[in-house]
Image (cartoon, grey):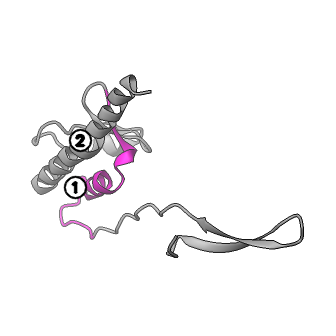
Amino acid sequence: MPFDGNTKTVQMPLPNGATTVLRVTSPPAKPVMPTFPPRRDRSRLDLRPVIWSLYNQPEDWKLDEHNRLVHLPTYHKFKANSVFFCGKIVSAPCNCGTVLRHGTWQDKFAMRRAFKVWKRDHHFAAIQRQFAGHFVH
């Protein structure tokens, strides 16, 4: 195993007094969200963190029974099935959903594109694995 930044060597004592060398590998770190510069129009929700999360942390998202995009850690629900309503918060456990203006057109198109990539690469792949699991034991 090649040495990389996630691997470290540890000496472990054995019961007979000898020592052995082990290589311990830590899991790769989750990507860190960048800091986005503030937008000129601060009356709109900034959808850039949502878009970033769809691309970089797809396991944090799911579709609910009403075809809404749900962020599992925060339980924010978004419409994502049309460009016009894409990025609109349907419900949230905080006051984020009370904002009347939801993102710029550029953000809405970017979120719609990110949603399609997420749905193709992550959501459908999970459904395929579940379906295959019904027949392969």
Which amino acid lies under the numbered mark 2 shown in the image of this protein?
Lys
Which amino acid lies under the numbered mark 1 shown in the image of this protein?
Ser
In the image, taking residue 82 as reference, residue 34 lies left or right, namely right
In percent of the image, x 48 and y 63: which residue is there? 28
In the image, taking residue 124 as reference, residue 4 lies left or right, namely right
Displayed quadrant of residue 75: top left
In percent of the image, x 21 and y 43: which residue is there? 120
Displayed quadrant of residue 63: top left
Rounded to the nearest angstrom, the CA distance separating label 1 from label 2 is: 29 Å
Element assignment for label 2: helix
Q: Give the residue pinned by disc 1.
A: 43
* Closer-to-camera residue (121/23): 23
Q: Horizontal and vertical percent for residue 116? A: 18, 44
Would you say residue 5 is visible in this rendering? yes
Classify the position of the C terminus by image quarter: top left
Mark 1, residues whose alpha carbon is within 10 Å: few (<14), some, or many (≥20)? few
Element assignment for label 1: loop
The residue stretch that appears in magenta: 37-64
Q: Is residue 125 above or below residue 33?
A: above
Would you say residue 46 is visible in this rendering? no
Q: Horizontal and vertical percent for residue 109? A: 12, 51
